[in-house]
Amino acid sequence: MSAALMDIHGADATARQKDLIGRTRELGRDRFRPRAAGFDARNVFPFENYADLREAGFYALTVPEDHGGMGADYQTYALVSAELGRWCPATALTFNMHTSTLLWASRLADELDMPDDVRAQHNIRRADIFRRVVEDGMLFAQPFSEPDSAAAAGKAAFGTTARPVEGGYRVDGIKHFASLSGAASHYGLVCTLQQEGVEPVPQNTMFLAVPAGAEGVTIFGEWDVMGMRPTDSRSIRFENVFVPDDLTMLPHGLYYQAALNWPHMFMTLTPTYLGLAHAAFQFTVDYLRGEVAGAPPAGSARHSPAKQLAVAEMRIKLEQATALFRRAIGEARLRPAKEDRLRAYAAQFTVMEYANDIARLGLRTCGGRAIFRNFDIERWYRDSRCGSLMLPWTAEICLERLGRESLFERGEQ
């Protein structure tokens, strides 16, 4: 490479954050990036990468230290995830489903309001889940999207339901875009508590851990898509699936409380695409310098004013996206100020759109040879277009909320 990689974490990163980022970089550089093209070409899940993550202890990245985990907080997780996205975006995107599930059950839950007896019960339940992650390699998917996207966008109750029965719940419904569908041991499932005579409402959302091998769980459909191909995001059908009480990830009502008061919980997809943007920029620089295997030797291309202007534009977009991302993840907290919440929307939109812009400019600037699949930039271009489409904060939803919430205060019509 032409020079040291641009840091995503910034000068204020703690020693602990730098250590975790360094360990992630080592795994990504030496193992994940060399495998990435093969996973994409074969359209297969990166099981080898997950074996490495588990061996290195990263399954427990957001498990509290007093439960045997690494104890990463939101900001630390976001920085580690961005570094992972630099090397294998599909691994970073899917791993987010696991780590954010555990983050919601740990640090987010600690900040939410709940009665003492409910908290005590939650602590007992999550302690066993944390133990299983650390000792047994329990791995979570987080199926969110449904055939009707209104629920995932926060505008309606989830169509997937949980009916209370003795000892637990019976779950019915369909989830789409279920990353890790064939790899996870459990599905961190958002669904609506079904109560006789009660209209389904978002306030009754439940968050349950459904065993992947439970009777009534069926993975169906194909996953043959443009980008993020190795994520194995097939659809899942749940038919009268029993989920024991002990696998309640958040007590009743707590998911809704978190969604209202901890909005940055929905920004955990962003780091993947920031890491991808950094990778696309670095690739373009290295390609024009003749430092990419199989690329033309350094010649007149990097002396071209048109190429220099394109690289400059890429650098400006990358610096803007990175600065906004750093600030936004530093402001993640319970009940953030209005401007902090709006900045989170802006960060999500900027990173998702700029990642694709940077990959597009990189592909164009490197020239015709770069469309061959032996070059990473072609794959990153395809992957980068997916970010703005991902619920619950698509690019369009971010724009809508930024505009409306800038013009209206809560309660105003």
Image (spheres, grey):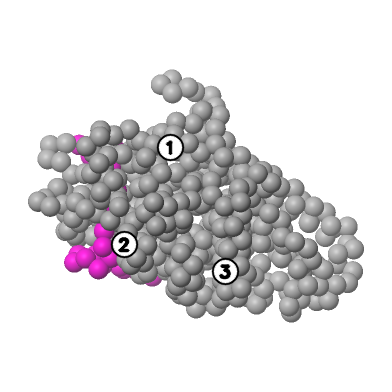
- Which percent across, then down, holds residue 365? 77, 63
Graded by Cα atoms within 10 Å as few (under 14), some (14 to 19) or many (20 or more), the crowding at tag 1 reads: many
Distance between the Cα atoms at labels 2 and 1?
A: 26 Å
Q: Position of residue 327 (x, y in %)?
A: 61, 39
Q: Nearer the viewer, residue 250 or 117?
A: 117
**Alpha carbon separation for disc pair 1 and 3:** 31 Å
Q: Amino acid at mark 2?
A: Arg
* The C terminus sits in image quarter: top left
Amino acid at the residue labelled 3: Leu
Residue indicated by mark 1: 262
**Image point 57% across, 52% down: which residue?**
16
Quadrant showing the N terminus: bottom right
Query: Nearer the N terminus, badge 1 or badge 3?
Result: 3
Q: In the image, residue 302 lies at what x, y percent?
A: 86, 64
Between 187 and 359, which is closer to the camera in this rendering? Answer: 187
Q: Are marks 3 and 2 in contact (CB under 8 Å)?
A: no
Secondary structure at badge 2 equals helix
Name the residue rendered at 27%, 45% in the picture. Answer: 122
Q: Residue at x 41, y 44 (%)?
A: 107
Mark 1 falls on what kind of element? loop
Q: Nearer the viewer, mark 2 or mark 1?
A: 2
- In the picture of the structure, the residue carrying the numbered disc 3 is 27
Q: Which residues are magenta?
A: 199-222
Which residue type does callout 1 highlight? Trp
Is residue 28 a member of the stretch shown in magenta? no
Residue 155, how many percent across, how many down? 36, 38
Query: Residue 2 appears in which quarter of the rendering?
Result: bottom right
Residue at 37% across, 69% down: 183
Query: In this image, 5 relative to 390: left or right?
Result: right
| Residue 218 in magenta stretch | yes
Q: How many marks?
A: 3
